[in-house]
Image: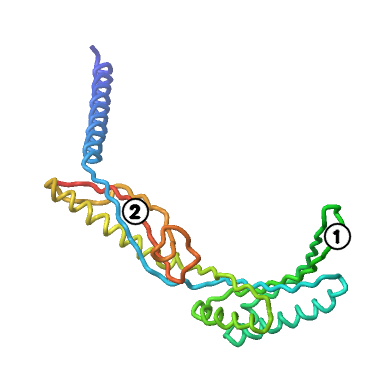
Amino acid sequence: MNKQNQSGLFFLGLFVAAGLAIAGYFVGQTLYNAKVAINTAEAKGLAERRVMADHVDWMLTFSLSGTSREQLPKLYKQAEQQQKIIVELLKENGFDDSEVDVGVLDYNVYQYRDNQQRVVDEEHTLNGVISVSTNQVDKIKQARTNMSTLLAQGINIENNPPSYRFTKLNEIKPDMLREATKNARLAANEFASNAGVKVGGIRSARQGSFYVRDAGEEYGDTNKIEKDVRVVTTITFYLTE
């Protein structure tokens, strides 16, 4: 066999050996990773906060009615006067023009007929809406009490329940996620100590949804000023001996 053929066989053998070595490394690494992946523990971490609503939407409605179309000019004048009274009372309670929205007056007519479909009576109604949207949550309770006194002045006002909202969720998310992660690790440590192993790093983590509910309630998030914020994270930890 000449030297050229011997040299070719040498390099061929070298490449084959290198290939086997590399393949062996990846196989070994794959087996190692698989073994590590098996030694894991999944734990859930809960974080809860009691917060206060920081925004409120409140709607007031009022109405006037007459028995004929001829009464409409007078009804409109009375409705405008009542609008003014309501807005002035809101301002007396600390709300400014940017927080108060006065809607248009809505007109409706209802006809009542007998068995022969003849009109026997009519009702002409004007409905007004005044909305308050404010961050001054603490002023709403007293304002609602004061608004009810308008009933004694002959104003047919409906004092609708306000909607309280918490809008600063993004500000507390980071701290709550850290707390949930910490609680998940505590749960994993309890499991690990019973198994005679230790908790290592995080393999994977799944963040649950943030839930905002009225304090002490399972459903609803607009009726109370106090809110409960809750999040649950699911984290898989590596376990080490």
Q: How far is mark 2 from mark 1, CA to CA?
A: 66 Å
Q: Residue furthest bottom?
A: 92
Mark number, residue 17: none
Q: Amino acid at mark 2?
A: Thr
Question: In which quadrant of the rendered view does residue 121 lie?
Answer: bottom right
Q: Nearer the viewer, residue 215 or 127?
A: 127
**Left/right of residue 240 with respect to residue 8 in the rendered view:** left
Query: Is 75 located above or below residue 179 in the figure?
Result: below
Sort mark 2 into few (<14), some (14-19) or many (20+) by Cα contacts within 10 Å. Answer: many
Q: Nearer the viewer, residue 134 or 160?
A: 160
Q: Is residue 63 above or below residue 9?
A: below
Q: Position of residue 97 (x, y in %)?
A: 65, 81
- At a point 36% along the width and 50% down the height, the residue shown is 206
Residue shown at 41% from the left, 61% from the top: 217
The quarter of the rendered structure image containing the N terminus is top left
Residue 191 on image: x %, y %: 18, 49
Residue hosting label 1: 119
From the viewer's perspective, is the residue at label 2 or at label 1 nearer? Answer: 1
Q: Which residue is mark 2?
A: 233
Q: Is residue 236 above or below residue 84?
A: above
Expressed as whole percent of the image width and height from the top left, the position of residue 107 reads 78, 67
Query: Circle 2 — which element?
Result: strand
- Three-letter code, disc 1: Val
